[in-house]
Amino acid sequence: MLRDNSIDMNGVRTLMAIAVPFFLLVVIVGYFLFSRWMGRDRSAENRRKSESSPPPKDRRRNLK
């Protein structure tokens, strides 16, 4: 029975070693795609804000 338990633990460790990084990768990619999708909806609001005050990148270019 101890051998069976050790084999099961190794199988669980192997499964976790494969599943956890894959799950993290899916979460990161999903968050990136979701943020880009939300960014498209907010792009109009960002344009309105940029008209009233220029972004810091333009200020740096003007100083040079």
Image (cartoon, helix red, strand yellow):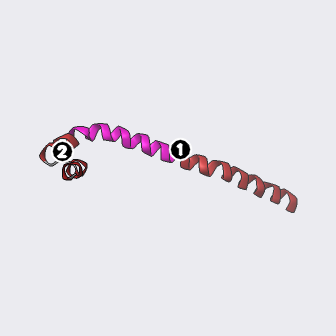
In front: mark 1 or mark 2?
2
Which quarter of the rendering shows the N terminus?
Answer: bottom right
| Mark 1 crowd level (few <14, some 14–19, many ≥20, 10 Å Cα) | few
Question: Is residue 38 rendered magenta in the image?
Answer: yes
Q: CA distance from mark 1 to mark 2?
A: 33 Å
Residue at numbered disc 2: 50
Q: Hey, which residue is sitting farthest left in the picture? A: 52
Is residue 1 something one can see in this rendering?
no
Frontmost residue, 16 versus 5: 16
Which labelled disc corresponds to residue 26? Answer: 1
Q: Position of residue 18 (x, y in %)?
A: 66, 48
Amino acid under disc 2: Ser
Magenta stretch: dominant secondary structure: helix
Q: Would residue 2 be found to the left or right of residue 20 on screen?
A: right
Is residue 13 something one can see in this rendering?
yes
Q: Would residue 13 be found to the left or right of residue 5 on screen?
A: left
Above/below status of 27 relative to 5: above
Q: Residue at x 25, y 49 (%)?
A: 57
Amino acid under disc 1: Val
Q: Hey, which residue is sitting farthest front in the picture? A: 64
Quadrant hosting residue 51: top left
Above/below status of 5 relative to 32: below
> What are the residue bounds of the magenta stretch?
26-44
Q: Position of residue 2 (x, y in %)?
A: 86, 62
Q: Residue at x 40, y 41 (%)?
A: 34
Label located before the other in sequence (1 or 2): 1
Q: Position of residue 35 (x, y in %)?
A: 37, 43
| Mark 2 crowd level (few <14, some 14–19, many ≥20, 10 Å Cα) | few
Q: Position of residue 11 (x, y in %)?
A: 76, 52
Frontmost residue, 7 versus 42: 42
